Amino acid sequence: MRPGLAGIAVEMLSGASCGLRPRLGSLLLATLTKTVPPMSGVGSRRFRSTSSMQGFSEMARERSKTVTSFYNQSAIDASAEKSSAKYLHKELPVRIAHRIKGFRSLPFIIGCNPTILQVHELYIRAYHMLIDFPQIQDQDAEAQFCKLVQQLLDDHKDVVTMLAQGFRECRRHIQDEALIRSFLDTTLCSRLGIRMLATHHLALHEDNPDFVGMICRRLSPKKIVEKWVDFARRLCEHQYGNSPRVRINGHVAARYPFIPLPLDYILPELLKNAMRATMESHLDTPYNVPDVVVTIANNDIDFVIRISDRGGGIPHTIIDKVMDYHFSTAEESAQDPRMSNFFNNITNSGNQSSPMHGFGFGLPTSRAYAEYLGGSLSVQSMQGIGTDVYLRLRHIDGKGESFRV
């Protein structure tokens, strides 16, 4: 185990700086450690306390990089000393340790929920696997590290769904909504950042002239919107027998460097919301429904994707709640068989996570992701007419300030 990094992370996991009392934190730590299956010599190890927390905030902070630095990165060398692998090897345990600390700051009754506890244990397992991986000295070790990273991506693909389910199960015990929102924003955005870093490193090994790792050199917003329009329409047709047509206008020929991964999380949610609202407000005429309109606007600083529907708008009584975790019309739809499966029947695509829909997670998670990417997600509703959703994201071409991963 690497002494410096291990010591830093151990201090984070000791419970001294989180909301739990030390005795309770120690008890929870002991319980969780026993439930993690042994792997590659980890089973007999226990967290050890270190002498001091002095300098902790400086040493243990996450070392984020501007996304432009990844765009300027070349494909991976034959050498295992490549900075991408070494950075990932050092950075992932620190980020995961921060997330474990976050789980231990939750109120005890929420942290003990079996589903949330399962996610907590996934992070502990990942931490052990990463911290025990030896320094990368040659190409074979780097190849093994890539396999480990891919395994962790696969193991954690359902984390969003599990968190949504867990918090829904213990919803009645939530007294501090602000604390839970902060926890979920931080956890979900950190997860997105970790997945982008891991996906980028793995993609550097692929020979694709259109990509630099995870970054598409000339991403077409029109094409990525069309991909998810087709997907959302199939779901809508399966549920309702029909779906709204989607018209795309604006800067449809625009192309620029960007990361498809976060768009693959956000766009399906926004399009499905628009289609569902449209169909639900025209149940009497399901084969004669208004179009959903997607407008693309591109400029030197950022780009905007507006999704407009004629689904009747969001009622005044709930407009302020749509960005809150666990506010979802899916609960109401359970009473109507025409709506029951619309948000839940989304399939996985590649190595992406499972759906964040149907538990009141879709829109707030999309908002958190947009803000993490240096942008914003806003909703404008015209009650009685429809809703416009604006997704605004910064460019990463280096001409302006870009977000950090």
Image (spheres, rainbow, N blue to C red):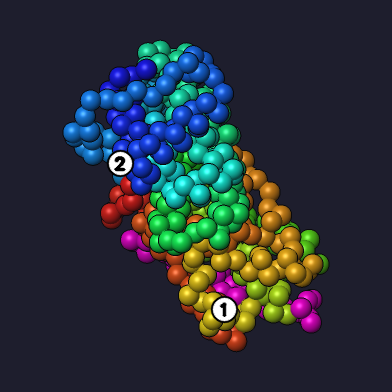
- Tell me the residue at 52%/34% (across/down): 121
Residue 314 disc label: 1
Residue 360 position within the rendered picture, expressed as x and y whole percent measured from the top left: 57, 62
| Callout 1 amino acid | Ile
Q: Would residue 373 be found to the left or right of residue 317 on screen?
A: left
Residue 323, given in percent of the width and then of the height, sits at: 49, 67
Quadrant for the N terminus, please.
Answer: top left
Residue carrying label 2 = 17
Give the mark nearest the N terminus, 1 or 2: 2
Q: Quadrant of residue 132?
A: top left
Give the residue at the far bottom of this rendering: 384
Q: Position of residue 25 (x, y in %)?
A: 40, 38
Q: Position of residue 83 (x, y in %)?
A: 33, 26
Q: Specify whether residue 257 is in view.
A: no
Write down the region rendered in magenta: 283-309
Q: Which residue is found at the position 36% from the left and 47% from the top? A: 19
Question: What is the distance, in whole Å, between disc 1 and disc 2 at their CAs?
Answer: 42 Å
Question: Residue at position x 47%, y 16% from top?
Answer: 44
Up-down relation of residue 240 to residue 163 (above or below): below
Q: Is residue 189 above or below residue 65?
A: below
In the picture provided, is 76 more to the left or to the right than 265? Answer: left
